[in-house]
Image (spheres, helix red, strand yellow):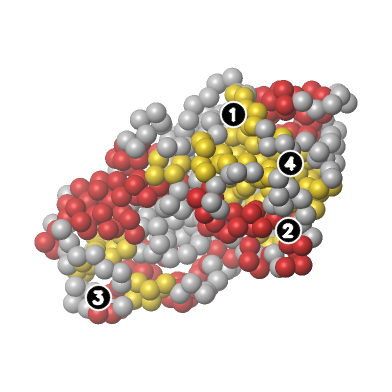
């Protein structure tokens, strides 16, 4: 998963893009990049690291212009440790195009061969985003054939991109001397929305960008739709896919998105409250509430669900884990031994909230189980009499191929295991999972216009319909070859990346 933003304004945009990336930092911490445009010239700065570390005053001064885009990256395709694969990516023809991408192409290897053999384009990295950029550039070149560029040409090019590309993709591109183009895959798996200010139009991954930069949220970009904002700020929009179906990634609501965002008409915070309500029903069927003394969330994303669960069951809610925000994220640390140490560094238990009590820990999801096992042991070490664990998400049994850094099937603690077997591995006294259909209903009820979700990591149904067992095996082999990675913070969920796999 990544966070992306694009802006066209009457004033310099470097500070606005920087502020937007800070608001999207949760979507990627590996690298950050900004490009601006002035007099048809691109100015680019990108590097590995957090936004605040990548951009210094001297870098910001070197980014002039009234249009541009930016990205924060958590890689799932390509080399996670290569600075060359930080975005944006650039090609000089036609016109000059710079692109950022959130998602994951499932046919990137086939496209790479087509680009080399048929389109005569060279790919210099292992990133599927560079593949996508070159497909778009080729299609724009094909429809314009040397003539001046019109918005209708861009929509025709995006139409051809939809025909060739498979997987998930939210895309923003700056076209030199013309404006900003944005489009979303025909299933709307990855989010993208439109905002407006007095003299500014912008597109971004989450609505929190609009609110956090004093702009007005206008609407979500529809699945398959393309929008083009010319340099005068005029908006052009057109549906460019032949068949569209809104199936947003349900993991956005479970874990990935900021709780203060609204995506495809659904409040992320309210979705997590609803998940807490339905999870409470599952808890009652497993552990009598009178055997639970206190409900404790595992920071951060589980807090709304845990608070709602406690309220429904009439139980005390306590913040009993303190998070150290100044410790590096565990996903950049090689090996499980380092991960285990990092969990203890990042979370500390308040012993008085555990001592002599039966505690119900609530997490947003459980992926590998490694961190869950460590946290359960921390609760026992702090004096808990019994430790129950509830997950606001169902068991994660299948790899994700659409841009969330999810482990291979063999690494998933729930893969081919019963709940009782998982409970034994984690070491808790009871383990309660959300039900898949209850999760879909809890989130989907907030927008009846959404008829389905991508919930492939929970139910094994890949909404694009083109994923085979061979594809899963190939992606798993790619992950193992590259060394994979570790997860992010105190949550048990994976961090969204762009195409390998990881979590706890």
Determine the secondary structure under disc 3: helix
Crowding near pointer 2: few (<14 within 10 Å), some, many (20+)? many
Mark 4 or mark 3, whichever is nearer to me:
4
Determine the secondary structure under disc 1: strand
Residue at which label 2 appears = 46
Q: Residue drawn 58% across and 28% down?
A: 224
Depicted 384 relative to depicted 453: above or below: below
N-terminal of the two: label 2 or label 4?
2
As drawn, the label of residue 174 is 4
Depicted 55 relative to depicted 354: above or below: above
Q: CA distance from mark 2 to mark 4?
A: 16 Å
Quadrant of res 333: bottom right
- The spot of residue 57 in percent (x, y) is 72, 68
Q: CA distance from mark 4 to mark 3?
A: 53 Å
Q: Are marks 1 and 4 in contact (CB under 8 Å)?
A: no
Crowding near pointer 1: few (<14 within 10 Å), some, many (20+)? many
Depicted 12 relative to depicted 470: above or below: below
As drawn, the label of residue 353 is 3
- The spot of residue 207 in percent (x, y) is 50, 46
Residue at which label 1 appears = 225
Determine the secondary structure under disc 4: strand
Determine the secondary structure under disc 2: strand
Q: Residue drawn 79% across and 23% down?
A: 143
Q: CA distance from mark 2 to mark 1?
A: 28 Å
Q: CA distance from mark 3 to mark 2?
A: 44 Å
N-terminal of the two: label 3 or label 2?
2
- The spot of residue 52 in percent (x, y) is 63, 66
**Is 220 on the left or on the right of 38, as rendered?**
left
**Is 390 on the left or on the right of 263, as rendered?**
left
């Amino acid at each position: 998963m990544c966070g992306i933003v694009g802006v066209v304004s009457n004033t310099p945009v470097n500070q606005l893009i920087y502020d937007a990336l800070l608001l999207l930092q949760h979507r990627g911490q590996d690298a950050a990049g900004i490009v601006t445009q002035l007099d048809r010239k691109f100015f680019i700065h990108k590097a590995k690291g957090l936004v605040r570390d990548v951009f210094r005053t001297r870098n910001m001064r070197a980014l002039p212009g009234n249009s541009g885009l930016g990205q924060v990256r958590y890689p799932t395709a390509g080399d996670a440790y290569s600075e060359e694969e930080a975005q944006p990516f650039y090609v000089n023809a036609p016109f000059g195009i710079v692109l950022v991408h959130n998602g994951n192409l499932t046919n990137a290897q086939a496209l790479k061969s087509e680009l080399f053999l048929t389109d005569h384009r060279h790919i210099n990295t292992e990133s599927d985003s560079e593949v996508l950029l070159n497909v778009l550039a080729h299609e724009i070149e094909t429809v314009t054939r040397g003539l001046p560029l019109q918005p209708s040409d861009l929509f025709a090019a995006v139409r051809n991109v939809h025909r060739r590309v498979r997987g998930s993709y939210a895309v923003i591109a700056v076209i030199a001397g013309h404006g900003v183009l944005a489009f979303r895959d025909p299933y709307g798996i990855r989010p993208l929305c439109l905002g407006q200010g007095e003299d500014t139009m912008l597109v971004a991954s989450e609505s929190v960008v609009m609110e956090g930069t004093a702009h007005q949220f206008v609407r979500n970009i529809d699945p398959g739709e393309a929008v083009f904002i010319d340099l005068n700020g005029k908006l052009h929009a057109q549906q460019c896919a032949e068949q569209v179906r809104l199936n947003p990634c349900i993991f956005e609501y479970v874990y990935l998105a900021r709780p203060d965002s609204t995506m495809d008409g659904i409040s992320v915070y309210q979705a997590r409250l609803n998940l807490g309500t339905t999870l409470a029903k599952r808890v009652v069927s497993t552990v009598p509430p009178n055997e639970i003394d206190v409900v404790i969330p595992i920071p951060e994303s589980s807090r709304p669900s845990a608070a709602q669960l406690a309220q429904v069951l009439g139980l005390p809610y306590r913040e009993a884990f303190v998070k150290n925000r100044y410790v590096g994220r565990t996903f950049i640390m090689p090996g499980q031994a380092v991960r285990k140490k990092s969990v203890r560094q990042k979370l500390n238990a308040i012993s008085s909230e555990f001592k002599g009590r039966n505690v119900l820990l609530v997490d947003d999801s459980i992926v590998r189980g490694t961190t869950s096992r460590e946290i359960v042991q921390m609760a026992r070490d702090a004096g808990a009499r019994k430790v129950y664990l509830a997950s606001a998400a169902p068991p994660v049994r299948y790899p994700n191929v659409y841009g969330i850094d999810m482990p291979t099937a063999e690494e998933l603690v729930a893969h081919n295991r019963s709940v009782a077997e998982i409970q034994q591995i984690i070491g808790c006294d009871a383990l309660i999972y959300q039900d898949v259909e209850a999760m879909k209903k809890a989130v989907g009820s907030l927008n009846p216009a959404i008829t389905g979700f991508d919930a492939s990591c929970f139910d094994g149904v890949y909404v694009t319909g083109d994923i085979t067992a061979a594809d899963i095996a190939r992606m798993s082999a790619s992950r193992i070859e590259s060394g994979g990675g570790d997860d992010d913070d105190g949550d048990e969920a994976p961090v969204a990346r762009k195409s390998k796999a990881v979590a706890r």
